[in-house]
């Protein structure tokens, strides 16, 4: 497209857009006042001009301002494009519509650019545009100071916030609990620094200073970076952070940590000391001034606390920064029950019918309750136990159980053995119900007596064993059964100087088992007997039925015949014979010859009545 046509086309576009100048016979030039560009990307600055009719452009030239001087970048004539020597030579160009194009925009490209158009007799025009370059900074980094001491006299450095490689220069604002912090010269100070990198981008750092108090350990800080990108104002925020505040201890707490309010011997108890300074100071726990029990950790633990551990304990801390010393104390009280004492502790064995009184006593930190038990069952309440008219059943262990009602789980006990002189009381046990000759059996006898009884067996050939405990003697005999023992049995005798007792074991022979073959034969015989009885019963039933039929016939009440209406006929030669009619269901060819009542033979085809003589 020729320059004249291009100018005419541009003129028409501007006219329809409503941007035409006042006169149609003069050269008009349109260049945007401001163009936004992003670092590293490509941008263009348009230059649109309008020529009078029958005119053409002579040249279009692009320049930029630097220190109030104009420097040409390139020009375009009817002949072609002419690039001038500059640091932009490799990155600039001119489009068909005369726009200046810049690739890989850098911060140094942010300048004022001029577009000149010469049209010969039509005149000359020049307009300028400002190229603004921007770039979003990298993610901000915050470095928090370590261990900031609380002080009201001087400012302490809190943290440093850095924003790198932004353009134009970003700004940083500090926030504390969502409220902005501004330098006021007394409580807060902010020191900013800006560095221009070799790339032309800016790195901004900001340091926050504050008067730090103990309460600031709970505050949340962050910094906010404000920057511009393509003409739009934007912000980015760092993550919230807290600072470590160092402050001296002002208070100290000393507590007892145990399973319950009322402590007892055997509990696990910990004394805990805690000061409110940071970092924590060193602790010293002691009961007596010159006897240090624990240090540094502030804890003293008793795995199984004893009554001797009761007393007043002290915890002391010393803060080297403030040179302050703090001290606290607690009173550890351990409930206890001493071992009970039973009187009389040792006594002679009683004779049957005598009386005995025992007394149990113990000391404890609180009121006590006493109970007497035997075999786990309560036999008496209180310190005293009275036994009247004793027998051998009174013999055994008695426990004095001491509890403290106000302290759950605190209990102590002691037992005493009461021995009663008595003649033996004997019980026996046999481990087999039935025996057989040559079988090894076990028998047991238990005797209760004082003095201890001696157990003897009437069968000397056996093997016996004895054990005794608290007046109980247990003797076990193992012996092989003989025919003589089956008859006589075995006696167990217990004896002491007060008398004797005897127990007799009667042996019963085990029945012999029935052989399998004999059992089968017996069952077979029983089955045969049942069959015979059934046959006999059947015959009897048939006989009775026959007699009934005959009786009915004699009375004339039973009609017979094939039609059921004719009388029973007899052959004339045998009028007094008893005849029973039998009908055959067999076919003629199967029936054969049948013999009649008179000895005649009949043919198989004869379907007449058949008679059987029952007289004989």
Image (cartoon, rainbow, N blue to C red):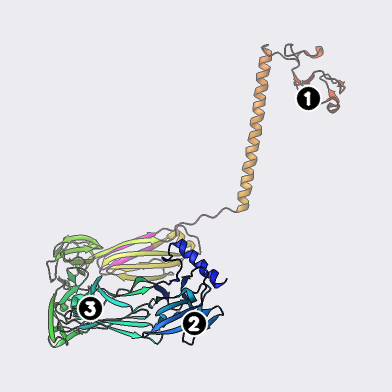
Residue tagged 2: 74
> Of callouts 1 and 3, which one flags the residue occurring earlier in the amino acid sequence?
3
Q: Which mark is residue 301?
A: 3
Residue tagged 1: 585
- In this picture, which residue range is highlighted in magenta? 491-515
**Pointers 1 and 2 in contact (C-beta within 8 Å):** no
Neighbours of disc 2 within 10 Å: few (<14), some (14-19), many (20+) = many
Q: CA distance from mark 1 to mark 2?
A: 144 Å
**Pointers 2 and 3 in contact (C-beta within 8 Å):** no
Q: Which element carries disc 1, helix, strand or loop?
A: loop
Residue 492 location, x and y as percent?
A: 36, 64
Quarter of the rendering containing residue 491: bottom left
Q: Nearer the viewer, mark 1 or mark 3?
A: 3
Residue 99 appears in the picture as rendered: no
Q: Is residue 503 magenta?
A: yes
Residue 68 location, x and y as percent?
A: 36, 84
Neighbours of disc 3 within 10 Å: few (<14), some (14-19), many (20+) = some
Neighbours of disc 1 within 10 Å: few (<14), some (14-19), many (20+) = few
Q: Is residue 556 magenta?
A: no
């Amino acid at each position: 497209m020729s320059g004249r046509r291009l100018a005419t086309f541009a003129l028409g576009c501007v006219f329809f857009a409503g941007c035409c100048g006042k006169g149609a016979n003069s050269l008009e030039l349109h260049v945007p006042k401001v163009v936004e560009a992003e670092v590293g990307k490509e941008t263009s600055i348009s230059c649109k001009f309008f020529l009078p009719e029958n005119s053409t452009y002579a040249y279009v030239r692009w320049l930029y301002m630097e220190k109030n001087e104009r420097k040409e970048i390139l020009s375009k004539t009817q002949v072609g494009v002419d690039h001038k020597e500059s640091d932009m030579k490799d990155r600039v160009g001119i489009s068909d519509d005369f726009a200046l194009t810049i690739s890989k925009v850098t911060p140094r490209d942010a300048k004022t650019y001029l577009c000149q158009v010469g049209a010969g007799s039509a005149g000359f025009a020049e307009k300028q545009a400002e190229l603004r370059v921007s770039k979003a900074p990298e993610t901000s980094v915050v470095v928090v100071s370590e261990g900031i001491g609380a002080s009201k006299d001087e400012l302490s450095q809190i943290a440093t916030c850095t924003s790198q490689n932004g353009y134009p220069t970003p700004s940083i604002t500090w926030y504390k609990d969502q409220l902005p912090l501004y330098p006021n010269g007394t409580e807060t100070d902010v020191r900013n620094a800006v560095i221009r990198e070799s790339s032309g981008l800016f790195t901004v750092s900001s340091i926050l200073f504050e008067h730090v108090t103990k309460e600031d350990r709970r505050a949340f800080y962050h910094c906010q970076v404000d920057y511009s990108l393509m003409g739009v104002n934007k912000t980015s925020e760092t993550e919230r952070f807290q600072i470590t505040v160092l402050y001296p201890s002002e208070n100290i707490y000393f507590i007892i940590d145990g399973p319950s309010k009322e402590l007892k011997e055997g509990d696990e108890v910990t004394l805990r000391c805690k000061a409110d300074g940071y970092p924590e100071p060193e602790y010293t726990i002691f009961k007596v001034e010159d006897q240090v029990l624990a240090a540094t950790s502030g804890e003293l633990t008793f795995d199984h606390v004893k009554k001797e551990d009761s007393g007043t304990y002290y915890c002391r801390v010393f803060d080297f920064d403030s040179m302050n010393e703090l001290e606290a104390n607690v009173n550890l009280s351990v409930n206890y029950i001493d071992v009970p004492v039973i009187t009389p502790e040792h006594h002679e064995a009683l004779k049957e019918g005598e009386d005995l009184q025992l007394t149990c006593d113990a000391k404890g930190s609180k009121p006590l309750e006493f109970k007497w038990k035997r075999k786990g069952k309560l036999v008496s309440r209180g310190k005293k136990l009275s036994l009247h008219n004793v027998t051998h059943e009174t013999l055994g262990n008695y426990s004095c159980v001491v509890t403290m009602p106000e302290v759950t789980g605190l209990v102590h006990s002691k037992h005493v053995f009461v021995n009663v002189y008595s003649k033996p009381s004997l019980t026996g046990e046999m481990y087999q119900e039935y025996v057989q000759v040559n079988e090894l059996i076990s028998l047991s006898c238990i005797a209760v007596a004082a003095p201890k009884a001696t157990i003897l067996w009437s069968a000397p050939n056996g093997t016996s064993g004895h054990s005794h405990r608290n007046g109980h003697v247990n003797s076990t005999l193992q012996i092989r059964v003989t025919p003589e023992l089956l008859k006589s049995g075995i006696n167990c005798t217990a004896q002491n100087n007060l008398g004797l007792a005897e127990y007799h074991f009667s042996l019963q022979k085990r029945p012999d088992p029935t052989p399998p073959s004999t059992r089968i034969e017996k069952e077979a015989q029983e089955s045969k007997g049942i069959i015979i009885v059934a046959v006999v019963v059947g015959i009897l039933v048939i006989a009775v039925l026959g007699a009934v039929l005959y009786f009915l016939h004699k009375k004339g009440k039973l009609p017979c015949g094939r039609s059921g209406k004719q009388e029973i006929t007899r052959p004339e030669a045998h009028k007094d014979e008893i005849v029973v009619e039998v009908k055959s269901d067999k076919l003629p060819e199967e029936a054969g010859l049948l013999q009649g009542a008179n000895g005649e033979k009949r043919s198989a085809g004869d379907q007449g009545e058949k008679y059987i003589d029952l007289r004989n």
